[in-house]
Amino acid sequence: MDFIKKAKGAVKDANDLNDGLKKLGFKGASFGSKKESPASSVASPPATPATPSAAPFSPPSAAPSSPPVLTPATSTMSIPQIASSDAVPMCTAPGAPTKLSLVARKSLRDNFENNKAEHEAKLSRLLGVPWTITVDTLGVYSYSVYHDAAKSNLGGIINEYFDGSIRRIEDWLNKFGDNGRNELNRLASQHIVTLEPTSDKAVNYGTPAITGGKLRLLFRDEHFCINTAYVCDNIAEVVNEAGKASSGGSELSMAARNSIQKSYDAQIGELVQKVSKALQATITFLPNFEANYAAMLAYEKTLDMDDYDDQRKINKDWASGIGAATFDYFDGFHARLRDQNFHKDEMLREGFNESVDKNTVALRIVPGPLSRSYNDCVIEDGVLVIRTRPDYWWTNSRDATKQLMDLL
């Protein structure tokens, strides 16, 4: 009986609790009216009503059962690539790799990518404007088929190409200064340096080239990773030839301007003073650099520079020596005055000043015959003109005014 009384009391207490919950606003709630499964025996608190603008809750998706596999194409490793239009042609030799191996990617990261920013900073500092390095690493890697060392040390080899080339450019700029700096920046107007293969048999191991506004470090395809530090040994020649090609001969090349600045401008003032003192008149020298440069360039284009006999018909350093050669012709004239004692003989001075009444000495390259071998001099309209031919340029230059006395 006591048990029945206790049960009735529990039911009454439950009903009273339910009535209390309803009065508090929990209309759908009930206590003890439903069976709970063992897993949900603890009642959940009432949910807060959602505002009208709230979006329904979406639970997060389940985590993948296994980590994703990274392929070379999705790897987070930073590998420089160039535009598809400049992509390196893949090597077609049998066995050439078609994708970067893990070893190659690690070498690129450790030995090239970690040094790339430093190389770009140094090159930009040397050239005075920002320069960047771009490499189609997969295309370059395909040429490792020729040398096993390139397969395991791809990053180190690429790094050596750029490190050695920047050192050579620095040496070249120490010689050519602003003339070289401005010319390279002008010709390689995109300020980008790349590494690419070439199948040109005239290239032994490597050479720089300037095309499409870029400085390209070319390696002979089957000689990839050989003599990497010396690919820019001939940077001066390449820049000079590119400059001549870009101007069509209408402008002085970088080598010519540098020669004029260092070998003519730097010392012609002193020579003018010496000659003017010897003749007791203010003498002017007329070098005709542009016209003489154009004449030499036109003559050079008539020759086959791959033919030994034609090579002997021109001074191959004529452009890089045009300033020194021009000064030599004028200095030879001063030596002639001194040897003939013009500075001591008033009669000789009067004879010169009467005949050369424009007080001007000019240098001119002419296509036609000369009155003597190699060079001569004539007086035209009060100007003493030293003449030579393109094939005799800078030959016996100090004897060009040998017949001066016969003209006065």
Image (cartoon, rainbow, N blue to C red):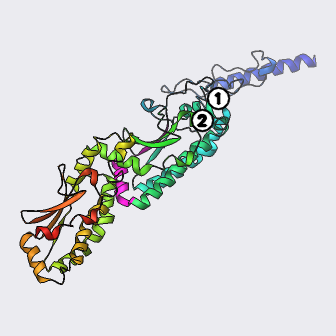
Report if residue 189 is visible in the image: no
| Type of amino acid under label 1 | Leu
For residue 9, above or below residue 239: above
Query: x, y percentage for residue 84?
Result: 45, 29
What percent of the width, then of the height, locates residue 256?
A: 31, 55
Cβ–Cβ under 8 Å for marks 2 and 1: yes
Q: Where is residue 191? Give x, y as percent.
A: 40, 46
Tag 2: residue type?
Answer: Thr
Q: Position of residue 111 (x, y in %)?
A: 62, 45
Q: Nearer the viewer, residue 29 or 321?
A: 321
Check disc 2 and report the residue beneath it: 76
The quadrant in which residue 18 appears is top right
Q: Secondary structure at mark 1?
A: loop
- For numbered disc 2, what is the local secondary structure? loop
Q: How many marks?
A: 2
- The C terminus sits in image quarter: bottom left
Reading the image, the residue beneath label 1 is 70
Compute the Cα span from label 2 to label 1.
9 Å
- Using the image, determine if residue 90 lies above or below residue 348: above
The residue depicted at 39 percent of the width and 53 percent of the height is 129
Q: Which residues are magenta?
A: 176-198
Q: Residues within 10 Å of mark 2 (few under 14, many from 20)?
A: few
Classify the position of the N terminus by image quarter: top right
Query: Which residue is rendered at x = 86% and y = 18% of the image?
Result: 7
**Nearer-the-camera pick, 60 or 198:** 198
Magenta stretch contains residue 43: no
Query: Foreground residue, 355 or 94?
Result: 355
Q: Earlier in the sequence, mark 2 or mark 1?
A: 1
